[in-house]
Amino acid sequence: MKKQRKRSPQKSRHGTAAAPAKQPNPMSRRDMMRWIKSGAIAVPILGIAGYFGATSVQARMAEADLSRVGNGRPSIVQIHDPQCNQCQVLQGQTRRILRGFDDETFDYMVANIKTQSGVEFAARYGVNHVTLVLFDASGDVSRIIRGPVQSNLLKVQETSHING
């Protein structure tokens, strides 16, 4: 009987032994079930996040539509600079107060002075940022509130404006 010689690995062009070709491991049943479970959890979460994201974008777009002033409902327009801390404080105060009202009784809008329409709106009424301009149902200015004010005073003024 002849002895069989062990073969050495094939040498590559560079003189080193070539690594054996790796075969992809097939996905086990357990791995497949984990993947399906993760997907079943992720799809509703992504759907909910997408819904709230789209709703938020729509709300921001509606707030930026300054043409709604004088549409038959009282309106509150904040002249706003998104980089201004006082503007953000005033916006937070206003939003907290307005949560107590039905959305059908008034319109809340934001005139962003970083946009052309916001600059034009502020110039038309002669106001700067950190200001609320309150309009009656026909679009006439009824009151101007400048700067963040005490929350209780702001609430009284906005409530009296909305309730007419």
Image (cartoon, rainbow, N blue to C red):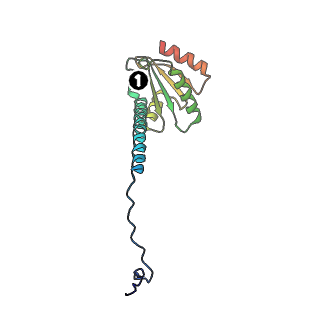
Q: Residue furthest front?
A: 1
Place of residue 68 in the rendered image (x, y in percent of width and height, measured from the top left) = 39, 25
Q: Residue furthest top?
A: 164
Place of residue 44 in the rendered image (x, y in percent of width and height, measured from the top left) = 40, 37
- Side (left or right) of 51 relative to 153: left
Q: Quadrant of residue 131?
A: top right
Picture residue at 56% right of the left edge, 36% below the top: 84
Observer-nearest of 121 and 38: 38
Picture residue at 39% right of the left edge, 32% below the top: 58
Q: Residue furthest bottom?
A: 2
Residue 123 visible in the snapshot: no
Picture residue at 52% right of the left edge, 15% below the top: 159
- How many circles with numbers are drawn on the protein? 1
Observer-nearest of 34 and 164: 34
Residue 152 visible in the snapshot: yes
Place of residue 82 in the rendered image (x, y in percent of width and height, measured from the top left) = 52, 37
- Residue to which mark 1 is pinned: 69
- For the residue marked with disc 1, what is the amino acid? Val
